[in-house]
């Protein structure tokens, strides 16, 4: 029964992300056309942002569909790192587009062009409604993918609210320079997030310690386990910035029965699960043993 319940949630999450993808892609096309018709560089820059979101949503949809696949002999940890491909493609699209939009925006600041404020206003209202509806749908979901996508789209809603405010101001005041200035702000915000995403990707690829894990804290707690005198060869990395992996050698008192060793190992596994380590491999050693890995470190 629980298996069918899990399948139902997985299927619902996949459908929710698929809906978000198609709505976002459709609205992105409307934005591109609307941005050209209204002569608004701010809307075009937000269209670029939404294009990046569409790529991320499309890949999230694909990965959500294959998330249930079991590890294989070739991929013993499963397919979790495919999410890095999604993040990399998304970052490259946003980086390239943002630099181009930033260049055009600076030109518009130096030589402002009159945008269609009324058209901007209508597109902004539509943007808030469409993105808001998708967020409302995804908010009901429980999967990590749904929550991440929902937060991403919330940023879009805030961007459209900014466009809405600027378009209202331009309806009453002749300040066309506000449009490229808003575009510069959106582009800088996008580039900042691209930098953060690429930093996370490199950290995962280089098997760095996960940002949400404190290695010293973990080492201290493992050393404080009853029967443990020391630890070494501690390595912590992450598969996708969410699924964390750890290997460690625990040095124990001598002599220790098999049952005693199993108890220490069980307590260590339980401790690690409670502090964000989803998969741990623990080796038990006596102090008198020589560790070939320690000698090569």
Image: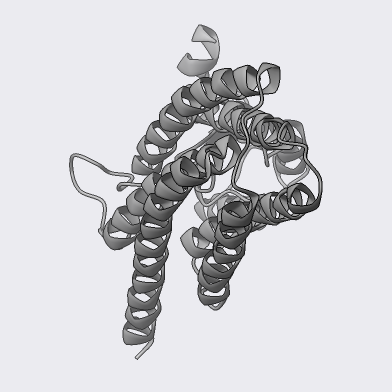
Extreme residue in the bottom direction: 1
Where, quadrant-wise, is the N terminus in this rendering?
bottom left
The residue positioned 34% from the left and 65% from the top of the image is 18
Q: Please determine whether, in this image, residue 26 is positioned above or below residue 216.
A: below
Q: Quick one: 99 or 168, which is closer to the camera?
A: 168
Q: Quadrant of residue 8?
A: bottom left
Extreme residue in the top direction: 296
The residue positioned 50% from the left and 52% from the top of the image is 258
Residue 125 shows in this picture: yes
Task: Report the side of 55 relative to 34 (left or right).
Answer: left
Extreme residue in the left direction: 73
Give x and y (percent) for residue 257. Answer: 55, 50
Q: Quadrant of residue 82?
A: top left
Give x and y (percent) for residue 181. Answer: 72, 31
Q: Please determine whether, in this image, residue 28 is positioned above or below residue 232.
A: below
Where, quadrant-wise, is the C terminus in this rendering?
top right
Q: Quick one: 112 or 23, which is closer to the camera?
A: 112
Give x and y (percent) for residue 151. Answer: 61, 57
């Amino acid at each position: 029964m629980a298996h069918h319940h899990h399948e139902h949630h997985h299927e619902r999450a996949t459908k929710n992300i698929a809906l978000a993808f198609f709505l976002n892609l459709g609205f992105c096309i409307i934005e591109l056309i609307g941005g050209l018709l209204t002569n608004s560089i701010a809307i075009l820059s937000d269209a670029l942002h939404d294009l990046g979101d569409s790529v991320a949503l499309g890949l999230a949809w694909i990965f959500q569909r294959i998330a249930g696949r079991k590890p294989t002999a070739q991929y013993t940890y499963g397919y979790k790192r495919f999410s890095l491909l999604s993040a990399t493609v998304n970052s490259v699209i946003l980086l390239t587009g943002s630099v181009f939009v930033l260049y055009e925006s600076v030109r518009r600041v130096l030589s402002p062009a009159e945008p269609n404020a009324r058209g901007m206003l209508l597109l902004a209202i539509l943007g808030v409604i469409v993105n808001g509806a998708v967020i409302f749908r995804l908010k009901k979901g429980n999967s990590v993918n749904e929550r991440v996508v929902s937060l991403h789209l919330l940023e879009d809603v805030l961007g459209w609210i900014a466009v809405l405010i600027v378009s209202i101001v331009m309806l009453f005041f002749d300040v066309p320079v506000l449009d490229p200035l808003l575009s510069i702000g959106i582009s800088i915000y996008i580039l900042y997030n691209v930098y953060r995403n690429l930093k996370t990707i490199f950290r995962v690829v280089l098997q760095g310690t996960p940002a949400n894990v404190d290695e010293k804290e973990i080492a201290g707690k493992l050393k404080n386990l009853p029967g443990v005198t020391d630890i070494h060869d501690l390595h912590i990395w992450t598969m996708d910035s969410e699924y964390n992996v750890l290997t460690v050698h625990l040095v124990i008192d001598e002599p220790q029965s098999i049952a005693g060793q199993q108890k220490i190992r069980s307590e260590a596994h339980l401790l690690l699960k409670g502090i964000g380590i989803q998969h741990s491999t623990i080796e038990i050693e006596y102090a008198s043993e020589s560790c070939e890995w320690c000698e090569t470190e």
